[in-house]
Image: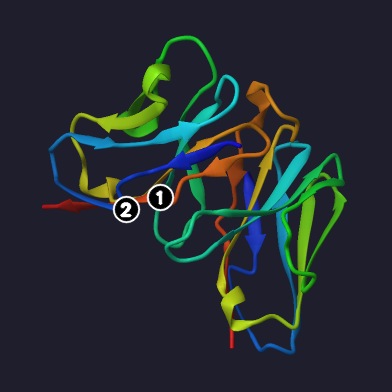
Amino acid sequence: ETGVTQTPRHLVMGMTNKKSLKCEQHLGHNAMYWYKQSAKKPLELMFVYNFKEQTENNSVPSRFSPECPNSSHLFLHLHTLQPEDSALYLCASSQDGASGGAGNEQFFGPGTRLTVL
Amino acid sequence: AQSVTQPDIHITVSEGASLELRCNYSYGATPYLFWYVQSPGQGLQLLLKYFSGDTLVQGIKGFEAEFKRSQSSFNLRKPSVHWSDAAEYFCAVGAGDMRFGAGTRLTVKP
């Protein structure tokens, strides 16, 4: 596998379910990101991990819980979601997450299409 | 704070016609600028990027973009559009803390 992979590609869950999204990058990068993409809205940055440490949490509700066990894997744990959380969740990685420098081009996975019933 | 504006939500062009997608940014220092493309059901793919140097940058798939500091713009261009270029295009500014525009959806007419 190359690049950034995400599983599952599609997920339907009820509001009381608990599920997890998985992201894996095979690029040797040190920074990983979760974005939410809703219809007719700009991409929303949710979380940033740099060298396995969370460096940004953009006021995301606690029903979303990220986990980064190593630089290659990133999870997004979901519980008691709301219908408005239905969206495409994109994972990305970059060489590092520090400001400045040519190493911050982000590479994206295909996304997980989440539907909350 | 950095921000990006893509004034056109939806653009339709005929196949073979030229294309220009607009992007205006706000950034406190020398900007790092990117254009990404997203096909339906897919993630974002980088088309081109500007960090420094020549203000006209070449990308993949025949796209180019020109950085104009005086206008705070980074417009994307292609001289002749192909049907396969139909997609959503996103301009972004920043580095690790990247800000994306709302996107421009491109429709290509036969």
The quadrant of the rendering that contains the C terminus of chain A is bottom right
Task: In this rendered view, identify the residue nearer to me: A104 or B73.
Answer: B73
Residue B103: x and y, percent?
Answer: 40, 50
Badge 2 vs badge 1, beta-carbon distance below 8 Å = yes
Residue A20: x and y, percent?
Answer: 75, 71
Q: Chain of mark 2?
A: B
Residue drawn at x 40%, y 34% as measured from the top left: B24
The residue singled out by tag 1 in the image is: B103
Residue drawn at x 86%, y 45% as measured from the top left: A52
* Vertical relation: A43 (above or below) B90: below
> Does residue B57 appear in the picture of this structure?
no
The residue singled out by tag 2 in the image is: B9
Relative to B53, A1 lies left or right: right
Q: Earlier in the sequence, mark 2 or mark 1?
A: 2
Residue drawn at x 32%, y 37% as measured from the top left: B22
> Does residue B49 appear in the picture of this structure?
yes
- For badge 1, the amino acid type reads Gly
Task: In this rendered view, identify the residue nearer to me: B79 or B34.
Answer: B34
> Which class describes the residues within 10 Å of circle 2: few (<14), some (14-19), or many (20+)?
some
- For badge 2, the amino acid type reads Ile
